[in-house]
Image: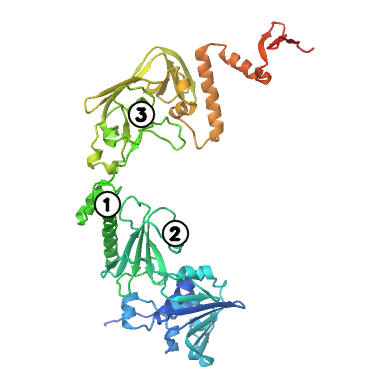
Amino acid sequence: MQETICARVNARLLTKADRLFTGTVEGRIIEILQNARRAGGTTVKITNHNGLVTVRDNGSGIEDFQKLLDLGGSGWDEQLERGEDPAGVGLFSLAPREVTIVSGHRQAVIDAEGWTGKPVEVTEADKAVSGTLLRFKDDKPWDFDTVEKHAVFCGMTVVVDGKRCHATPFCSDAAVHYQTPGCRIEITNEISNYHQKWLLTWYTGKILVNFHGQVVQLDCWPAKNRNRLAILVDITQDTAIRLMLPARTCLIENEAYEQLKSAIEKEFYRYWQRQKSHSLYYDEYLRARELGVELPEAEPQFQVGLISDEYDQAVQITMTREFNVRDGYLCLDDDGIDEHAETNAHLLAATGKLKDTPFVPVTIHSGYMGYSWSNLPRVTKVDVSRGKELLRHSIGCHDIACFDELSIRVETSDGKSFESDVPIAVVDQPPVREGCWHTDLVCVTTAARNHLVNDNIWYHMGGFDGEGDSYDTQSCRFEKLLDEFWNDLIGPYESLRQKLLDDMACLFDAWRKAVLTEDGRLEIYFKDGSCREVRPGA
C-alpha cells in the first residue's frame, strides 16, 4: 500500500506566534517599520498617547485583511519577494496584544484569541485612512531615541510625537556596488554616532550590514588586525543575501554569504591600496597579491627593546627619533640561544655604556617576518661575566647577589660583538638557600643602587603579583627587603645608623651631634652651641 505525506502548518504554531520574534520593543519597531516600507510608505508617524502607540504610514494600504492573519503569507509582489525574502509574519510581532488596524474604509480589531484562530470581524471604519494605521498598547512607549535607531537608515521619513527622526545614507558615495550578491561596500576609519548605536562589542574593527534600516553585525573580519576600521555593507533592492528568519538578527551562511565575504576581503585590501601605506601582516600582504591587489611593503613595525611590562617596571631603552629599524638586532626564541639571552641583551642596551657602535635590540611581531625590513642581523650569543661575589640574599622566592664586577657581552650574526659593564644581569643558577625554588639569580653591582630604581630590580625578581596584596603594599615590602640587602652590604650597623638618622629627622637641621651613653642618657648638641641632656625615665 502506497503512502503519501505533505507539509502543513499546525494550528498550534499560532499560539506561539509571539515567540517567533525577539520579544522586545525594538524588535516590534523593526517589524512594523519594515512592513510600512514594503508597502511603499515614505512617511511613518508614531504617537504615544494615553498608554497607546499609534503607527500610521502612507503606503499602499491593505487590500486583503485576511492576509494580516495569514502566518507566512506576505502578499508582497514578486520583485520584493525575490529581493528581500519577507517571512510574512511581521504583524504577528504584536501578538498577543490587542491591535486595531485601519486601512481605507475598513478596520479590524485583533485580540489575544484572534491571533490564535478565533474569527476576526472586518468592519466599516469610522474615518477613512489613507495607507495603514495601527493602534495598540505596548510594554512601554515607542520613544524617540529607540525609534530613531531603527529609522535612521530605513529610507523613510519617520516622525515620533511630532519630532522628526534623523535620516542619513548608510554608506557614502565612495561605496562600491556589487551586483552579486547585491550590496554596496564601504571601508572607512570613521563612522557616525548612528552607526555606533548598532555595535554590539567594543573591540575595534566592525562589519555592519544594513537591511533597509535593520542593521546586523557581522564577524568575519578579513585580516588578523582590525586596524580601527569599519566595514559598511548596504543591501540593495535585488540581493541574494538573506537574514535568518523570523527574528532576522544574523545572516544565513549560504552562497551569497560567501560571495559577500569575498567582496569584503577584496575591498579591504583595495582600501589599503588607496592609502599607499599599511601595517598588514606579511601573509595578508601576500593574500592581497593573490587577489590581484598590489600593495607596497608594510611600514616597519617594531619596538625598541626586548622586555616590557604593563607596570613600567622593566628598565627601558630610549632611542632618538632618527633610529632606523635596519640598525637594530633581533633576539628570537628559535635562534637556540640561552633563555636569559633576551633579558641580558636588553639590559646591555639599556644600562651599558657602548662608545663606538650602539647596540639596539628590537622586537618585531612574528606576523611581520618576511618583509625585507624584518631581515635583520640576530643575537647569536650572550655571556654574563661576574667578578667576586660580595653578598647574597633571598627576597621572596628569588636570590639576589652583589658582585664587585659585572659585564655583558653580545655576539651577533653579522660578526660584531658588544660588551660593557652593567649594574644588573640575570643568570641561571641553582638557589643556595632553602625555600628558593627559582633558578634565576639577579646579579647587581653597587652601581645599581644609584643608577636603577627599585622597580627595575623588582621586575626581575617576580614583580607585582596581581593576585596578592595591592601594588603599593607589595612595592613597600620589596623596598624594605632591598634596603636591608644594601645595608648589609655596607656593614652590620648600617641599618641602625639609618634608623637613627630617620628618628633625628624631627629636629630638622638644628642638631649637630647626638651621643647615647651606656646608662641610657642622650646628649644632643645643637648648631647654636647649646646642649640638651635627656635622662631615662624612672
Left or right, residue 224 beside residue 159: left
Quarter where residue 417 is shown:
top left
User: Which residue occupies the foreground of this view, 276 or 470?
Assistant: 276
Mark in front: 3 vs 1: 1
The Cα–Cα distance between marks 2 and 3, rounded to whole angstroms, is 41 Å
Q: Which mark is residue 18?
A: none
Mark found first going from the N terminus, 3 or 1: 1
Quarter of the image with the N terminus in it: bottom left
Instruction: Say above or below: 2 vs 395.
Output: below
| Amino acid found under the numbered disc labelled 1 | Lys
Q: What residue would you read off at disc 2?
A: 200
Q: Residue at x 68, y 12 (%)?
A: 527
Mark found first going from the N terminus, 2 or 1: 2
| Amino acid found under the numbered disc labelled 2 | Leu
Q: What residue would you read off at disc 3?
A: 346
Residue sitting at the far bottom: 124
| Amino acid found under the numbered disc labelled 3 | His
Mark found first going from the N terminus, 2 or 3: 2
Quarter of the image with the C terminus in it: top right
Q: Position of residue 274 (x, y in %)?
A: 27, 56
Mark in front: 2 vs 3: 3
Q: What residue would you read off at disc 1?
A: 276
User: Which residue occupies the foreground of this view, 340 or 146?
Assistant: 146
